[in-house]
Image: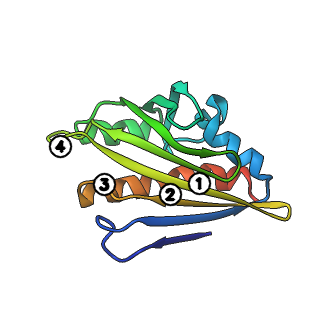
Amino acid sequence: MTDAPGSDDAARDKVVIERTYRAPVEDLWALWTTKAGFESWWGPAGFRVEVHALEARVGGALRYDMIADAPEAIAAMQGMGQPLSHHTHGRFAECTPCERLTLVHVIDFVPGVEPYESTIEVAFAAQGDHARMVVTLHPHRGPQWTRMSVEGFRSQLTKLDARFAA
């Protein structure tokens, strides 16, 4: 397990997170590219998603609702004055089966911030009976949102860590 930001300033730098799991690459790929797979792990602890469209091909749509569903997540969202769910949409910008994918999300739910795109790149590689996954998170427009995004992604990876624990 490796989490390696490019520097201490997560607002400007890409963040690279690596994991190696006892699973075939095809299983990890399916978690990113199928409705059932994506819904089974996407979202930080205390959140879930409902996928409305997932077209794993270049230019294919990705649309889902992120929903706070655990009491502590609900309380946190309410405490920040945020809705308990929000619609998220984007597209697959790259999709090479079991090797690479790039997701581009449209961030249009941040109060007072013009919509912008956020990119997640993922590389997969077989290593014997394990699969290596390298995720590169691109920075958001502001340090607070970048930190929240990175923390949320690390949190959601705990779902995969538990699933594929050796």
Q: In the rendered structure, are the residues bearing label 3 and label 1 in contact, judged by CB atoms less than 8 Å apart?
A: no
* Of 56 and 135, the residue lying toward us: 56
Where residue 45 appears, as percent x and y from the top left, is 51, 46
At x 71%, y 49%, the residue is: 98
Of the two numbered discs 3 and 1 in the rendering, the one whose residue sits closer to the viewer: 3
| Relative vertical location of residue 132 with respect to residue 95 in this rendering, above or below | below
**Disc 4 versus disc 1: distance between alpha carbons?**
30 Å
Q: Which mark is residue 140?
A: 3
Of the two numbered discs 4 and 1 in the rendering, the one whose residue sits closer to the viewer: 4
Q: Residues within 10 Å of mark 2 (few under 14, many from 20)?
A: some
Q: Which mark is residue 158?
A: 1
Query: Is residue 147 in view from this perspective?
Result: yes
**Disc 2 versus disc 1: distance between alpha carbons?**
7 Å
* Of 61 and 49, the residue lying toward us: 61
Label 4: which residue? 113
**Disc 3 versus disc 1: distance between alpha carbons?**
22 Å
* Amino acid residing under circle 2: Arg
Q: Quadrant of residue 95?
A: top right
Circle nearer the N terminus (2, 3)? 3
Of the two numbered discs 2 and 3 in the rendering, the one whose residue sits closer to the viewer: 3
Query: Is residue 166 in view from this perspective?
Result: no
At x 29%, y 30%, the residue is: 83
Q: Which mark is residue 154?
A: 2
Q: Residues within 10 Å of mark 1 (few under 14, many from 20)?
A: some
* Amino acid residing under circle 1: Thr
Where residue 114 appears, as percent x and y from the top left, is 18, 41
